[in-house]
Amino acid sequence: MLALTTCLFGSAETSAAETQLIKEEALRIYFEDLFQADDPSEYGFTTADMDSITFADPRAIYRLNPHFAFGKSKEIFVPEADEWIALVYENKQAINGIRLKSQNDKSLTISGFGYPLELAPNLANLAKDEVLIEELAIGSYYAFHTMKQSIRELGNENQDSFSVEDFQTMLLERYQQEPTMNHQSVWLYSSLGLLVVIGTSFIIGRKRSRR
């Protein structure tokens, strides 16, 4: 059984710890069914040989706090993990990931498969103190280092780190330029994130792994 102990960070500090459990057998059965229905290459894999496939412990994906994005809060992300990812490896190379959701009893269940192909290798190299954050409105992923208080965008070629303050300034400038996403549009921002989740779930159901 795969087990993951995760810390929920409030103000970038550990505030609680919970253990999330999911059987590796469930991941493997789901993946075998996926390969029977679809071409493995569509997800970045080169083979359907399950002997070459391994799974990593699930990792939490936190949602960027819309109030932070609009300069209304110092909390970078929502402290409750919105989604989890279990990386899938082919011959020890991180290729893609299985999407997981937390239930009321804190157990994890499979909700779909497939992420941007550049995310898995980046996620495999996250430092111990880095938290994975998704900006739902545009589908970007960030690694927030809780000790260094620095942020880097995953998938960016240089992946230079920048400060929390610079990150917030960047977000403010971005959304100020959008006529429908100004300082009063926190609700709209959250709604757009929800639409991304719904749309992604539909696409996953139709075997997509690329955005």
Image (tube, grey):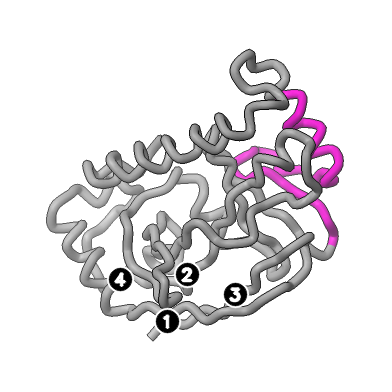
In magenta segment, residue 18: no
Please tell me which residue is depicted at 63% across the width and 79% down the height of the picture: 17
Given this view, does label 4 or label 3 mark the residue nearer the observer? 3
- Mark 1 lies on a secondary structure that is strand
Given this view, does label 3 or label 2 mark the residue nearer the observer? 3
Q: Upstream in the sequence, badge 4 or badge 3? A: 3
Name the quadrant containing residue 25.
bottom left
Q: Tell me the amino acid under the disc marked 2.
A: Pro
Name the quadrant containing residue 113.
bottom left
- Evaluate if marks 1 and 2 touch, with contact meaning CB atoms under 8 Å apart: yes
Q: Residue furthest top?
A: 179
Q: Quadrant of the N terminus?
A: bottom left
**Up/down of 186 relative to 30, above or below:** above
Query: Mark 3 to mark 2: distance in Å?
Result: 9 Å
Q: Tell me the amino acid under the disc marked 3.
A: Thr
Magenta segment, which residues?
Answer: 148-174
Please tell me which residue is depicted at 45% across the width and 75% down the height of the picture: 106
Q: Is residue 73 left or right of residue 92?
A: right
Query: Mark 3 to mark 1: distance in Å?
Result: 13 Å
- Evaluate if marks 3 and 2 touch, with contact meaning CB atoms under 8 Å apart: no
Q: Upstream in the sequence, badge 3 or badge 2? A: 3
Q: Tell me the amino acid under the disc marked 1.
A: Leu
Q: Which residue is mark 4?
A: 27
Q: Which residue is mark 2?
A: 58
Q: Which residue is mark 1?
A: 2
Q: Tell me the amino acid under the disc marked 4.
A: Leu
Query: Mark 1 to mark 4: distance in Å?
Result: 10 Å
Name the quadrant containing residue 146.
bottom right
Q: Which residue is mark 3?
A: 6
- Evaluate if marks 2 and 4 touch, with contact meaning CB atoms under 8 Å apart: no
- Evaluate if marks 1 and 4 touch, with contact meaning CB atoms under 8 Å apart: yes
